[in-house]
Amino acid sequence: MSSDETVMDTGYTEAVTSLLYQLADDDFMYSFRGSEWLGLAPHIEADIAFSSISQDSMGHAAMFYKLLEDLGAGNADKLAHFRPAIERRNSILTERVNGQGYYMETPHYDWAYAVARSYFYTQAKKVRIDSLCESSFKPLADVAVKVRMELYYHKMHWDTWFKQLMSSTEVAKKKMADAIKLVMNDFGDVFSYGDQKQQIESHGLIGSEEDLKGRWRMNIEPFFVSLHLQVPEIPEGPVKNGRNGEHSGDLDEGLATLSEVCSADTAAVW
Amino acid sequence: MDKAGKQVEVAMKWELIKTYTVTRFIVTEYLDGVYVTLWKASTMHMLDKGGTRMTNFNSTNDEKQLEQFMQRIEANDKIEASDWMPDEYRMTLIKLISMHGMSEIMGALPEKEWVPKAPTLQRKLGIMAKVQDEMGHGQLLLRVTEDLLVPYGKNRADLMQDLFNGDLKFHNVFHMETKTWADAGIIGWLVDGAAIITQTDMLKASYGPYARALQRICAEEVFHAQHGESIILALVEGTDLQKAIVQEALDRWWEPLLMFFGPASKETTGSSKQDLTIKYKIRTKTNEEFRQIFFDKYIPRIISLGLKIPDPTLRYDQDSKLWFYEQPDWNAFKKIIKNQGPRSEARLNLRRHSYEYNSWVRDALSTSSS
């Protein structure tokens, strides 16, 4: 099916919509967690680069929400700000807090976790976006091509950080090992399409879960081999699957911050 | 002096400086709309001592260099990082630019609160780009400062420690609290608007690296002011709640905005380096001249939006072409520049804590094998 057709059948529209929620909500939350680091990164150059990536990622989320709006799902800003946690389809990994504490006080944010989460998430996003560039839904494929241009730099950035910290001091290696464990504990739903698996995979919108997992593994394997390390295993059957609206409390807390201002007057134009 | 003699002189001076690389900031002064620091007396003493020795050896040459330097300043030449410059000029620049750079970095913190909270996707994107720009300005300015610090054996890590110790100050406006989304608008529109006025004055500064950095900074600040104005326009045309928060924010920010440009003379706070920066052609106007330019530009705009300026005495005098206004509380200002403002310690603490908490990362990078 092509988007050029003016009428898409219901099943196709539902499949595209489900996939778009997953993509949009992922980048929305990933960007938010990144923006909490603003002004707190280990050095100024890292701060600037990270905030640039967060900004790009918010831009990606905005494009995905706009596609949803175009499909009749509702206003993009409302989709981003006013859907309760149970309606969110982001992966658990993207909603996790950066560490203990509130972002405006003196939080104990863990840079090792930031690097590990960003590295594995960006590697996953890379295989998803590459696949989406071939999507049967042309507007999504067009957006994916734009995202891919920026993602190239995100991946290069996090690859560099990951490799440097993984081949550095014993303290850094230990912190990275702990962070990777935390990240992988939450990785079970990153490539999942949840209850919509069959619908999403059957319409040529994106590669299958197994296909993308395989590509992800293939991409990161050489680096792990070079360090004589095992490629981390993606857990089967996540305890909670964000794609089905199952989330941690971290999401509620994050959504409250993200929608604090616009919730103060929902009738207002901001 | 022939070339060989010059090399001997330089080598001796460097050796002397290397022997006495005790360089800590200590005394705060006010300069050019920003706060600055003086070198610790012991460092000055050591440098002076070296200067005295060099003077005995070479006083005619120093005087000649100074004369040539001032001729370059008068001729509007651009001074570059590797050029000879008198210590007074170098220190004036270090104080000015390190303070400017650190203010950009600390200035990210009051706005940061509103980055995730921005009420729409476009506003989120706008403020993310804006605050990222500010961090970028900080980085650019610290790089300029680092080059100037080379003869003193100091680097960026020293500057960070000076900030944390309270020896290197950041701008008064960034010590204030932010309460609502309207603060994000006021900061962009009026605080950045005020910064544009002082910074564009220095676009032709005699020090080339600073002038070039300001070219980019000022270009981006114009976008920031437009970003802020756009937020304000939506609020003043909005609901009762929106109108109320923007007026309340203006009421709070008016006094810090007056303080932004610094006191009219050194009598207010005990010191001022306005004359020095004008002498070296780093800037051209006084603090009060900047403040009057700000009034000329923004008072009509503020009023045209239906906002009320919280100063019943404010009036324009046609004869003198000057605005008369109620002076801000300069005693409060003096407290702020001692890091005793409403959010001074909290913001320093946030920055200090994250810097120390992540020190393992800097260690790791310095020993990374890849």
Image: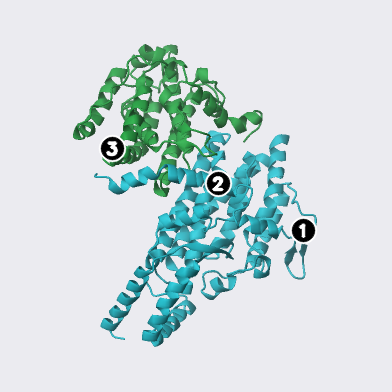
Cβ atoms under marks 1 and 2 closer than 8 Å: no
User: What is the chain identity of the residue bearing mark 2?
Assistant: B
Q: Is residue A211 visible?
A: yes
The residue positioned 44% from the left and 76% from the top of the image is B48
Residue with the mark numbered 2: B347
C-alpha separation, residue under disc 3 versus residue under disc 1 = 61 Å
Query: How many residues crowd around disc 3 within 10 Å: few (fewer than 14), some, or many (20 or more)?
Result: many
Question: What color scheme is it?
Answer: by chain
Residue with the mark numbered 1: B314
Disc 3 vs disc 1: which is toward the camera? 3
To the question of a shared chain for discs 3 and 1, the answer is no
To the question of a shared chain for discs 1 and 2, the answer is yes
Q: In the displayed structure, would residue B343 be above or below residue A247?
A: below
The residue positioned 59% from the left and 46% from the top of the image is B228
Q: Which mark is residue A166?
A: 3
Nearer to us in this view, A187 or A54: A187
Palette colour of chain A: green
Tell me the kind of residue under disc 2: Arg
For label 3, the SS is helix
**Which image quadrant for residue A120?**
top left
The residue positioned 40% from the left and 69% from the top of the image is B80
* Chain letter of the cyan region: B
